[in-house]
Amino acid sequence: MGEGIRIATVTGSVRPGNFTSKALALVQDEIRNHGDIALDVIDPARMRLPPPGTDTGSVEVRALRKVISQATGIVLATPEYHGSVSSVLKLVIENLGFPSTLAGKPVVLLGVASGAIGAVKALEHLRSICAHVGALVLPGAVSVPAVNRVFDGEGRCLDEEIERRIRGVATGLIDHIHQAVCPKMAMERMVREGGR
């Protein structure tokens, strides 16, 4: 049932050794465990994205939009900066156009923070932004508190329960795709091909 399924992951931090990427690596590993699903990793640290309203026709912007438009589902990961989503992730979203290529896509959210309550505020803002551009934000966003104590220097998660929750971001999205998106894709294919 994985035929044609692509999942894109986007990290919202460009800081070397950032915890957002360490948490997202677990999600990516879980997706890779499903050998029939293609994974696209979007890392803004490797891109030159223009500020909103300046250059929407660049090669990198077109490539970014293509990856998102071809994705069956999206994982967005952000640190909490000053009580909100990172400006890096917001810049990625701003470069997805209007109407956004996120529109109609199932999206799951992952947030990390050093504080005890985690990235709750960042995830609230991110959910609102995604809903505004028409993404289908799935329930079950995962917030990782005290992230600086959860991962070691090599990126290994030191808490089995938190690792299970982070990996659940991937499995939740994959389950949604299999239950809701794949049947829709099959129905559309059948209609286009005249029931053949």
Image (spheres, helix red, strand yellow):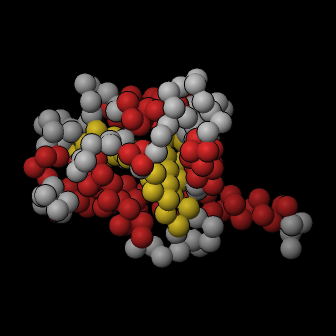
Quadrant where the C terminus is found in the figure: bottom right
Q: In this view, does 181 lie above or below 105?
A: below
Estimate the x, y position of residue 126 in percent, counting from the top left: 41, 33
Q: Which residue lies furthest to the right in this view?
A: 194
Estimate the x, y position of residue 4 in percent, counting from the top left: 63, 67
Q: Is residue 78 visible?
A: yes
Q: Is residue 153 above or below residue 132?
A: below
Estimate the x, y position of residue 162 in percent, counting from the top left: 20, 55
Q: Is residue 126 visible?
A: no
Q: Which residue lies furthest to the left in this view?
A: 149
x 46%, y 51%: residue: 42
Give the tally of numbered discs: 0
x 30%, y 52%: residue: 21
Query: Toward the viewer: 181 or 56?
Result: 56
Image side of residue 32 versus residue 180, left or right? left
Estimate the x, y position of residue 154 in percent, counting from the top left: 17, 62
Query: Toward the viewer: 190 or 43?
Result: 43
Image side of residue 48 versus residue 112, left or right? right
x 86%, y 66%: residue: 193
Q: Which residue lies furthest to the bottom in this view?
A: 35
x 58%, y 41%: residue: 61
Image side of residue 120 versus residue 136, left or right? left
Quadrant where the N terminus is found in the figure: bottom right
> Residue 124 occupies which quadrant of the picture?
top left
Query: Toward the viewer: 42 or 36?
Result: 42
> Residue 44 occupies which quadrant of the picture?
top left
Image side of residue 74 versus residue 162, left or right? right
